[in-house]
Amino acid sequence: MRKPINYFITNMAMSDLLFPIFLFPRNLTGLYVDHQWLISGPLGQALCKLVPFLTPVSSFVSIQSLVLIAVDRFGAVVFPLRSPLISSKLCPFFILATWIVAMAVSSPSLFAFQIVEYGDGVVSCGMQWHEAFGESSSVENYFLSLYVVFYYIYTRPC
């Protein structure tokens, strides 16, 4: 049971469990409260930053885990008599690397999301990209680069 593929499947399962834990409560409250943020203060500010940060982190970890599973299976099918491409001793390194890369790529959302209070007492959590990174930075370029790296390069057939 201590084979690399089992570690990668467990890593992907953990990241897939993290996704609904953070996404569903935000979406459900958004349906019924017109996208108001229900928690204010320091806890609300922390959740406003963490929820949009951890949701894509779990997606990126899943994508990277699938790539690692594909590499492991490729080595097992193409080179069946050779030692595995990814050994069991390297698995913790690769799993840690998937989380570090996903957090690094998603880190701009930690700076861009903030609680905005309106005059009538309405509190909302939204992306304030230009306030966090300046007018010269573009949110469209950020998302385009994420798309190219994670959805085109990682998932395109060889």
Image (spheres, helix red, strand yellow):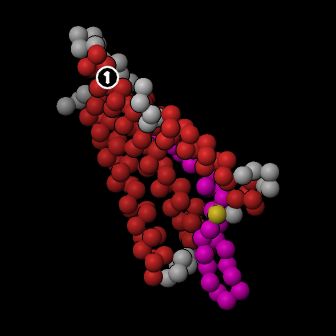
Q: Which residue is mark 1?
A: 74
Q: Is residue 62 above or below residue 39?
A: above
Which amino acid, by three-letter code, is at mark 1?
A: Phe
User: Can residue 42 be seen at all in this image of the molecule?
Assistant: no
User: 117 or 156, which is in the foreground?
Assistant: 156
Q: Is residue 75 above or below residue 131?
A: above
User: Can residue 34 be seen at all in this image of the molecule?
Assistant: yes
Residue stretch rendered in magenta on the structure = 99-126
| Relative image position of residue 72 (x, y in whole percent) | 32, 25
Going 55% across and 38% down the picture, which residue do you hit?
Answer: 149
Residue 61, image quadrant: top left
Going 79% across and 55% down the picture, which residue do you hit?
Answer: 134
Going 33% across and 32% down the picture, which residue do you hit?
Answer: 69
Q: Secondary structure at mark 1?
A: helix
Is 101 a magenta residue? yes
Is 112 a magenta residue? yes
Residue farthest to the right, as pictured: 135
Residue farthest to the left, as pictured: 1
In this picture, residue 63 sits left or right of residue 128: left
Q: Is residue 52 above or below residue 96?
A: below
